[in-house]
Every structure is written in structure tokens, then in C-alpha cells.
Image (cartoon, helix red, strand yellow):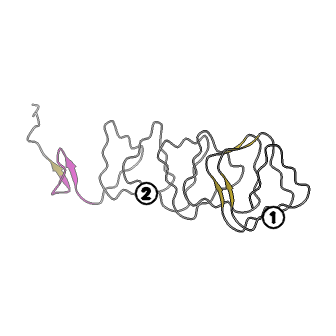
Amino acid sequence: GDVSMGKNVEISSNLVVYGEVTFYQDISLHSDLEISNNLVVHNDVSMGNHLHVVGDVSLESNLEISNNLIVRNQAFFDKDVSFGTRVKVVGDVSMESNLEISNNLTVRNQVFFDQDVSVGNHFHVTGDVSMQSSLEISNNLFIRGNVGINTLSPKYSLHIDSSNAVLLP
């Protein structure tokens, strides 16, 4: 049947649960939760509200979250973090170190850079490039295709639309 306790529960040996463990109130740990061997739950662990841990939580195996993981403050990782599928960030992402991408970086909307951008090898753009300030090229500029000045659809190697031009003597 049911077990109800109004005070502390101390288990000096094993706690084995073969059914569900359900908490309908908050679970608050004000010290470390230490499990020397295994915590084995054969079915679901369900909490009605929150699990609040003030100390450390250590996992030496997998942690699987079926729905959302919400971190309201900061998350720190001492080692690598690997995601099998996608990572979706709704807010800002801030990094104080390097970002290394082994394969492709796909940006579906816009990219903004507040500082200098350095490309070690090739910079390939499939679509349009638009700038609202100066473009400085310290070496050579190679263009395959047509170049348009004052036109978005150049028809010649160098196409200058002079309809709004002012001719100087």
C-alpha cells in the first residue's frame, strides 16, 4: 500500500524500485546527492513540480531528456559537448573563446560582425553580397562573371548604369 512519512528517510543499504517513482511536490537537496554505486529505475521517474539541487550532480553515463532542457542561468561544460541532431537556440549565444566548425555553417537569415572577419583560405558566396560601408581589398580581386555598377543585373563584363550619373568636364 501507500507509505507516508513526515520526517527524514535514511536508507543505509539499497533502495530498489520496480515500479514508478512519483513526486507531487518539489524535491530540494541542500547538499550533495551521492550514490556510490548505481541508481536503477526500471520505469519512469516523474516529478510534479521541480527538482532543485543546491550542490553538485554527477552522471557517469547518459542523461536523456525527452522534452525540454531549460537552463535559466549558466551551464558550464568541462569537456566536449556533442549533439546527435540539432541545437536550437532562441536567445543569444555568447562565447569567450573559439568556435570551431568541422563541416558547414549554414545561416538562413543574417550574420552580423561587430569586429574584423578573417578568412584563412577561400570565401565563397553563392548569393548576393551587400555592404553599407567601404570594401577594402589589399591584394587582388578576381571576378568570374559580370560586374554591375548602379545595376543589380549586369549584362556585360563591366555594366555601368549611368542614368543617374553626373558627367564631369
| Front residue (pair 47, 103) | 47
Question: Circles 2 and 1: CB distance less than 8 Å?
Answer: no
Q: x, y (%) of residue 37?
A: 85, 61
Amino acid beneath label 2: Thr
In magenta, the rendered stretch is 145-158
* Residue position marked by numbered label 2 in the rendering: 106
Figure check: 147 above or below 164? below
Secondary structure beneath dot 1 equals: loop
Tag 1: amino acid = Val
Q: Earlier in the sequence, mark 2 or mark 1?
A: 1
Task: Count every numbered label the image shows and give the total.
Answer: 2
Viewer-proximal residue, 2 or 28? 2
Residue 50 x/y as whole percent? 64, 46
Question: Which residue is identified by label 1?
Answer: 16
In the figure, 43 relative to 93: above or below? Answer: below
**Residue 135 colored in magenta in the image:** no
Asked if residue 150 is among those painted magenta in the image, a careful observer would answer: yes
